[in-house]
Every structure is written in C-alpha cells, then in structure tokens.
Image (cartoon, grey):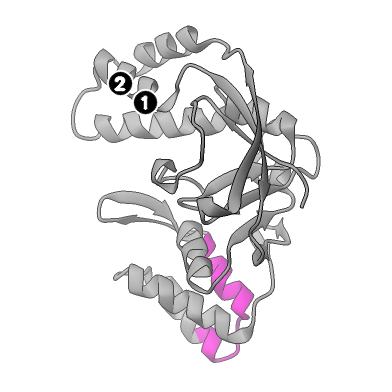
Amino acid sequence: MTTLYHGTTQKFDSFSLQDSFEGSFCGKGIYLSDSEYDSYKNYAQIGPDLRSKIDSQLDHISNSREVTKQDVLDITDTMLGHHSIILECSITAKKGFVFGGFIEEEIDFELEDNEYTNIYYYIKNLVEDLDSSIEENLMYYYMGEISGKELCNKLRLGCIDIDGEYTTYLALFCEALRYLGYEYVVFPNADKLFKMDMNPNTTHYVIFDEKHVKIDNVFEHKLEDRDEYIEGLISSFV
C-alpha cells in the first residue's frame, strides 16, 4: 500500500472516529490523500474544507439566534486549532470500494446485483421519509428501466436532515458499504470531484475504522493567517 497523508490543524497521537466531523462528505471516517501537497494546502492550512465546516457551524447558530463574537472564538478554537500538521500514514484495510469516476454528476462503480438493493434498503431503514422520486426510482429499478448503478446515483445526489443533523445520501451510502463489510472507499480523481487546489489524479481514501490506520511520521508546519481568518469571520457573522 502506498504512503498516504492526512492534513490537520489539530495535534493528536492517534485517529478516533469520535473526533470525525459528522457533516463530512462521506460521513464519519479517516480521510486520507495520496498527495502530500493536497494534504498540506487544503487540510493542514485554512483550506476550503475547514472553512466550509466552520461556516456550517456558524450558519447553524444563525438559524436560531444571532452569532456572537464568543461563538466565533469558541468554534474556531475547537475546529481550527493552532497547528499545521501532516501525518504520514499507512493502512491495513483490505476490502475497498472504488468509485471509478465522476461523469456528468454520476459515480462510476460496480456492485453485485444484490448489493444494490441491500444498500437501498439499508438507507431506507435509516431514513423514514425518502424523497418520493427516489421511491419511484426503486420501482423503475425492479421494472428493469434503470440499472442498480443509476439507482444508487439517485441516492448520491440528495441531502437530508436526520434528527436535526444535516447529512448527504453519499454518507449514508458509505455507511451501507460499511454494513456490507467494506473497510474503506477510494475516490481516484478527487481533484475533479472537489474542485480544490490539487495535483491531477489525486486520490482520496476514506477509512471506516481507525484500527486500520497507522501514523508513521508527523511533520509540523506553520499555520498561516489564523488571526486574519478569525477576524474575517467576526466581520461576516457578528
């Protein structure tokens, strides 16, 4: 297995799913990249991923009351940290699910026929009120009018609120893959998917269990523009 990297602004000795952000693209997991540049630029600094998560927390507060300066300071102290760290990692997970590509907003992948419906019903059990169009798509699947891949892509494109927590159907998809025995997922062309500053053909991995990730080396850098970023948040939200 190739060396993988995790960029973070927090210091820790080992990974824990308890510290994984609920609103992440694929839900809870250990997010890794095969590119050290990507990990540093987008995750070990104040990149678009971290900005989006902090904005989401502040937006959530603003939906119920006015955001205060202390709210900004508390959230940035918790989520932003004071460091710029690259963790060099290796993984021991064996059963991986590869998303082959993203073509016209669709995921390219292959599953066994029974796994398509297992994923659908697993998600249906988690979500009491699926969008009616998704229910229709299940009917079309059984009638042979759409493929299993098309059915699961319909799930990927949606977002939902479960018990007050915002999540994506892709996160539920990954949870279903975990249920089916998969240990990680792979996005081979993450640079096209996430539209961030990455080298071409950057690959992302999401590992479902921290026991499958080993930290081999730690490299610390300077966290740039922290104070300026926080002042900008205060100006925007308070």
- At which x and y percent is residue 8? 55, 29
The quarter of the picture where residue 172 lies is: bottom left
Of residues 156 and 77, the one drawn nearer to the viewer in this rendering: 77
Part of the protein shown in magenta: 140-156
Can you tell which mark lies on residue 74? Answer: 2
- Which residue is at a point 47% across and 45% down the rendered structure image? 24
- Which residue is at a point 37% across and 11% down the rendered structure image? 235
The quarter of the picture where residue 39 lies is: top right
Of residues 23 and 96, the one drawn nearer to the viewer in this rendering: 96
- Which residue is at a point 62% across and 19% down the rendered structure image? 220
- Which residue is at a point 46% across and 52% down the rendered structure image? 27
- At which x and y percent is residue 14? 51, 39
Give the residue pinned by disc 1. 78
Q: Residues within 10 Å of mark 2 (few under 14, many from 20)?
A: few
Of residues 84 and 211, the one drawn nearer to the viewer in this rendering: 211
Residue type at mark 1 is Thr
